[in-house]
Amino acid sequence: MTKINTHQLSAPEKLLWKLGITAPNEIDLEAIAYHLGAIVRYRTLDGGDARIVGDGSRAIITINASTPKPRQRFSIGHEVAHWCCDRGRGGFLCSKEDTSPQNCAAKSIEANANAFASMILLPDYLFKPRTAKQPITLDTASKLAQGFQASLTATAIKLVRASTSPAIVICHSQTKCEWFITNSAFPHEFWPQDELHQDTDAFELIFGSGNGMTRAKNTSGALWFNRRDANQFQMLSQSTKLPDGTVLSTISL
């Protein structure tokens, strides 16, 4: 493992480093929560994916038992963030939208908790060395997601944000672009088309009966973006259908 400058670590990373975590499979969210005075339990929750109730130095985090394991892990990280950063503000019942990794950029208590959760599940000091020289594709994100036991969506977002090459992750429904996230290197002049172009593999996924992940391939930028000269740019794109029926795509210049 490369040498770590602990002064540059974020608060979640400092917590992991203090606990001696040096590999993705060592990120035990339940143990981390317990170390902080919070017990994690799994129950059926109506109207939310996670809940935390605390008193003094102790708390109980309740996670929706019916959600997938990667989702549960992100929810634990989200509630740990509330316990670390928002103690004294009462309990939190967090909906699926509250604990969605694409909401990290907004300026709110829930968005801050998502950013904290992303960093504790996918800490830079473990994540970035594993992305060196790797293409910004869903194939890459999928392999990383398995290693970190994180969701594909959260990992794809992290992969795009961590890259120094221009990249974007986009989620489409049948009717519109639901959300997108770019990194700092991505040209702001490129604005995603609101509806999927019929010549994209993503279009076939969302309107066809197929599932799974498409092959990463070079496509014209005009298939994805409204910029007038977008057809002059070749972009590496890859898409997959998510359990909720939307399609997630990574695109890099």
Image (cartoon, rainbow, N blue to C red):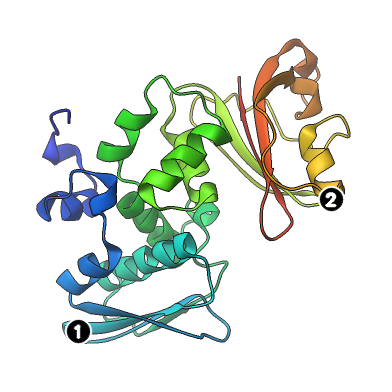
Rendered-image quadrant of the N terminus: top left
Residue 223 higher or lower than 193, as above or below: above
Residue 1 higher or lower than 218, as above or below: below
Q: Amino acid at mark 1?
A: Arg
The residue wearing badge 2 is 209
* Disc 2 to disc 1, C-alpha distance: 48 Å
Q: Please name which of the two marks, 2 or 1, marks the residue nearer to the observer.
A: 2
Can residue 27 be seen here? The reply is yes
Q: Position of residue 103 (x, y in %)?
A: 53, 56
Q: Could you say which is closer to the camera, residue 185 or residue 46?
A: 46
The numbered mark at residue 220 is: none
Q: Position of residue 61 (x, y in %)?
A: 34, 79
Residue at 52% of width from left, 66% of height from top? 68
- Relative placement, left or right, of 14 versus 74 is left
Q: Position of residue 67 (x, y in %)?
A: 53, 71
Q: Could you say which is closer to the camera, residue 229 or residue 217?
A: 217
- Relative placement, left or right, of 128 versus 9 is right
